[in-house]
Amino acid sequence: MPNGAQALIETLVAAGIDTCFTNPGTSEIHFVAALDSVPEMRAVLTVFEGVAAGAADGYARMAGTPAATLLHLGPGLGYGLANFHNARRAKVPVVSIVGDHATYHAGYDPPLQSDIETIARNVSSWVRTSRSAGELPGDAAEAIAAASGPPGQVATLIVPADVSWQEGAEAATARLPAAAPPVSPAAVEAIAKALRDSARTALLLGGVALREPGLLAAARVAAATGAKLFAERSTPRLERGAGLPAVERLAYWPELAAKQLGGLEQLILVDAQPPVAWFAYPGAQSSLVPDGCSVHELAPPAGDVPGSLEALVSALDAGDAQPTLRTASVPGRPEGPLTAEKACQAIGAILPEGAIISDEAITSAAALPANTAGAPRHDWLTLTGGAIGQGLPVAVGAAVACPDRPVLALQADGSALYTIQSLWTMAREQLDVTVVIFNNRGYAILDAELARLDEPVAGERARALLDLGDPDLDFVKLGGGLGVPSRRAETAEELMRSLQQGLAEPGPHLVEAVLPAVVSKA
Amino acid sequence: MPNGAQALIETLVAAGIDTCFTNPGTSEIHFVAALDSVPEMRAVLTVFEGVAAGAADGYARMAGTPAATLLHLGPGLGYGLANFHNARRAKVPVVSIVGDHATYHAGYDPPLQSDIETIARNVSSWVRTSRSAGELPGDAAEAIAAASGPPGQVATLIVPADVSWQEGAEAATARLPAAAPPVSPAAVEAIAKALRDSARTALLLGGVALREPGLLAAARVAAATGAKLFAERSTPRLERGAGLPAVERLAYWPELAAKQLGGLEQLILVDAQPPVAWFAYPGAQSSLVPDGCSVHELAPPAGDVPGSLEALVSALDAGDAQPTLRTASVPGRPEGPLTAEKACQAIGAILPEGAIISDEAITSAAALPANTAGAPRHDWLTLTGGAIGQGLPVAVGAAVACPDRPVLALQADGSALYTIQSLWTMAREQLDVTVVIFNNRGYAILDAELARLDEPVAGERARALLDLGDPDLDFVKLGGGLGVPSRRAETAEELMRSLQQGLAEPGPHLVEAVLPAVVSKA
């Protein structure tokens, strides 16, 4: 009979989980050794845990099913915590396996001993430490079910080393995820009535409402009632481009988001939270719901989100309403020295059909939505939890999940540095990812935050903390050092050429887009 | 009157904490803005939180006093958790400041909301969220006192944004750290009696017992009684070299450590834990204490460790005993193609007086102790908590604490990747650090662990997870990309030349030492 580690992998594979992003250590060595006995499991090596966690997020966003991660005790989980936080906010399924000391070893307080369950609870509502090889497959089956939702979540299964190495385990069968419960007709009718009562209504779409079926149904509702459509700022996976309904994302800056929502009398949440500013500012409100606007919920994240929108279409007799769809439209080819705006235009000009965009370009991506609105159909994966370092790992996971689709990772210079190790895994796995680094040599978002302060203008010591230009980062060398062919673009023409080359050739490529510096030198 | 952030910085500076390693975000922007009003505080920018946490550890190991860190909410703390774990195990003082959402904002569950206290508890027994600007300086003073110990610890102060920006705060005065309580004469006499009773006794030294006063006293005890001296495997700061007593570190592999301790009847702990294997193995004991050996404690970490050793010298009338000291002895200059052993020999041959070694070279450093035992006096900082990614950040902190001493960071290729972003801060601050990357293109320690398994030899899929040679990492490019002049050495002569050049010139330098690959290709 197999040992615990083998039975664990067999249980995962039997539930369709055949990909594991890992950075293993000694307490996981039996899992590593077991891989040759269960060849259906693909183990993808990452050289930093934040890459593994974010790759599992990106994988789940595109595959719709969980990947596993395998990390090394509490410190390994700690390095992964930021991207598990993003995965939690994306409501995606992840089976996070964390190796631990043998059950009897922990009491001796060896150097790596820590309280793994406590760390995990921040990102997982399902956390369990398995106590024996006999129980491990059943625990794994429960973890898989918990992760699968609805909604998806990060489920953390802690596996002590002796639980892995004990013999006599047998693979278990995970329960299939339950179908999401339908929304009651009365609740749908109440929303339909609200929509009939006032045209100053908007639907705020999040989560799975941003996929094609939800978007088309929502657009029919909008066409029939005059309601506006908004998407939450954080979109785990937004389907967009020519032929799909347009939906405006809420702005990052609260005063701009307040303008978007201004004048509304009713806001209807569809797999979305009541809108809130990312950060608080002195004297400003946290909530973005306009004064006097009532908030209703059509479907919670755990509900049948597309089904509820379809039911709303029926209740409104809107089945024949013609949704407004984006027509094809591609920006002209930019020329001359690069700016962030020209870089976004270049991306809009060349975006291929079926592209997956992992967007963590932050301020540099401001012009991206307008420049890609009429592009060929694509998926847009954005920063869901605000934990920096998501973009490159999510691109890794998306590329593993969708090997036949081009992945474009749009990444700010500052945010790239948290999980730059992603590039090595792209090279190792020869993933078809084209990385664009927007190098403006500073934390531009913090420069803007500093400028918003009421206080006397911050001085040179404050500004120095936002300046990444001393010394300049050389992403062509960083990419090359991690095994990815890398080029520098200083003009729009060079960027277009490099992008097209990157997209045309298999395997990963990196382009460093050199932009004007954003942080004024002291 | 100053706002909360200004009063916080003033409170730190008044307590002698004038260095803050940071990677700030929006919730910390008022702290950033306040830096220009309190110029005594030096803020050191890191581009990844793991660097900030490890730098504070390295700083405290060398300065003996805490630095502050400033990180961005739960995810930022998560990225820092591994190196805070190492700092906890090193028992060093760190004041970890974590920005949070404004007190009233958290209830809206904005994207970055998480339970920061829960994350912090894994590394901090002192955790507090400050509730107002008026309370913040007092909270900071308590954090400083808690961090200072004895023994030192990571104290976590969570500062909501509105607590930073509110006006009307006033700097507070931190209580000075209490002197460690002396060990009772009766307890010292009991240990003296044990030492007189049996020569098959060893002192196991850890923590501050590994500094010169403790080492000299312990060596007198050894000379007078015939007791052996051992150091724990994890040494926060071991003073060694010519003119200091020799003390043997316990081996990593439990069977080797068991041999070192074999035949002992008594083991006396001095700021040390009962020895335990780093990891458990099937059929092997966790404890490294030989059967029948009794364990005694002379001084706990919170006690007066050097004072207890001095008292023991007196109780044994060993004041005139001549401690055995290392004589000066330097290995010959190695020649020819590099191996890990020759690299260690090269380091021993050129080690300058007063060097600080940050050692995370793992398997490649096996020959280092023998090759540096008779070198000029130096400090040796090792991996205390087993959480990988410590070496380069600790080198950053040590170099900031000791700008007049050469720092040598000895780093394995695999472990270098977790916190490679350290190099940028070395370049930004022009720290005098010479980094040696031992590039053997694999996780050699895991290769050894895999080879120890009883099971049928692991196959190619397992071995692939230990192989960093596909693609090869190019550390010369990585160093250059992060602003550090970098060279490659393939022979012992090239390594010697590069080391001497790096040590002679100011600012950071990197040498990639190319070693034979350790993981056999499938």
Image (cartoon, coloured by chain):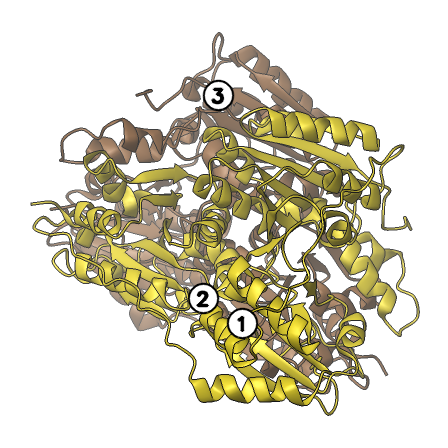
Chain colours: A yellow, B brown
Q: Amino acid at mark 2?
A: Val
Q: Chain of mark 3?
A: B
Q: Please name the residue shown 82% across and 35% down the image.
A: A333
Question: Does A507 appear above or below A28?
Answer: above
Mark 2 lies on residue? A123
B35 or B257: which is nearer to us?
Answer: B35
Asked if disc 3 and disc 2 are in contact, CB closer than 8 Å, the reply is no
**Residue marked by disc 1:** B114
Q: Position of residue B223 (x, y in %)?
A: 33, 43
Residue A228 % position (x, y): 70, 73
Q: Is residue A500 above or below residue B8?
A: above
Tell me if A82 is positioned left or right of B194 in this view.
right
- Label 2 close to label 1 by CB (< 8 Å): yes
How far is mark 3 from mark 1, CA to CA? 46 Å
| Callout 1 amino acid | Ser
Q: Which one is closest to the eye, mark 3 or mark 1?
A: 1
| SS category of the residue bearing label 2 | loop
